[in-house]
Amino acid sequence: MAELVLTDREQKAMRALLAVEPVAGSPIPPRDFLENLAVLVPSDAVGAALAQNSGAVTDFREAPGGYRERFHNGERAHSKRPHYVGVMHWSRQPLAASSCQAILPDHKDGLAVGFRSGPDAVAQVFWDRRRKAFSARDLAVVDLLLPVLQRHLRQARAPHLPADLTVQERRVLMQVATGLSNAEVAAALFISPATVRKHLENAFRKLGVTSRLAAVVAFEGRQLTGAASDRAAKVARTT
């Protein structure tokens, strides 16, 4: 990994990102969040998208607005394409880049970070560059940003949650929904397993449920059936 020293401007942008809380019910961060990402990883455009497993994009935001459409000859930026989980440096993965048209026409490179957002969707942040490829330093910055991005992109859609469900209780439920144990949730959120249990007890009471599986169903606003049955079983038995 490249040695990483942030400038004063970059430190200010990082502090701003750390201060922003996820938007309840949406994994797409606000525009000022994207603009701060562009300070830390300079690019011609930066954006975020939420895509279903089918590839259909259901939510999309970029800065500057309309940038991608200008390079797709009028094609909408949210047409159906695969959206990948993890860090994707597209110039280093040309086959994958070609499959989802990740590098825009007349552009040199693209970069993306994707996370599961519930069982049926992927939320992804992307950067586009016209003239030069992303460097080892850019990738080091992205690596530093991963926990911040995870907080926002894994925010599950839950439009009817109790108003008094705290941010930390939501974060714990988001981690539980992926099948993590209490110990794993504690490690991911830098809190103790006892604190995780307390947050879950409070969330159960507010949601009117008595089990982890019921809490996840209420939190995600869906039934965990069919293709999600394996995940449901894992959530139900994990403590």
Image (spheres, helix red, strand yellow):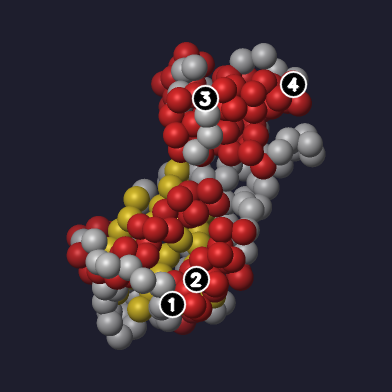
User: Label 2 to label 4, Cα distance in Å?
Assistant: 40 Å
* Mark in front: 1 vs 4: 1
**Residue at (37% x, 62% y) in the render:** 142
Compared to 12, does 143 lie above or below? above
Q: Contact (CB < 8 A) between labels 2 and 1? A: yes
Amino acid, disc 2:
Gln
x, y (%) of residue 230? 41, 21
Q: Is residue 103 left or right of residue 80?
A: left
Q: Residue 11, which numbered label? A: 2
Sequence-wise, which precedes: disc 2 or disc 3? 2
Amino acid, disc 4:
Arg
Q: Residue 219, which numbered label? A: none
Sequence-wise, which precedes: disc 2 or disc 4? 2
Sequence-wise, which precedes: disc 3 or disc 4? 3
Nearer to me, 141 or 83:
141
Q: Label 4: few (<14), some or many (≥20) within 10 Å?
A: few
User: Label 1 to label 4, Cα distance in Å?
Assistant: 45 Å
* Mark in front: 3 vs 4: 3
Sequence-wise, which precedes: disc 1 or disc 4? 1
Sequence-wise, which precedes: disc 1 or disc 3? 1
Residue at the farthest right position: 163
Q: Secondary structure at mark 4?
A: helix
Amino acid, disc 1:
Thr
The residue wearing badge 1 is: 7
Q: Secondary structure at mark 3?
A: helix
Nearer to me, 185 or 235:
185
The residue wearing badge 4 is: 205
User: Label 1 to label 3, Cα distance in Å?
Assistant: 36 Å
User: Label 3 to label 4, Cα distance in Å?
Assistant: 19 Å
Q: Contact (CB < 8 A) between labels 2 and 3? A: no
User: Label 2 to label 3, Cα distance in Å?
Assistant: 31 Å
Compared to 108, does 239 lie above or below? above
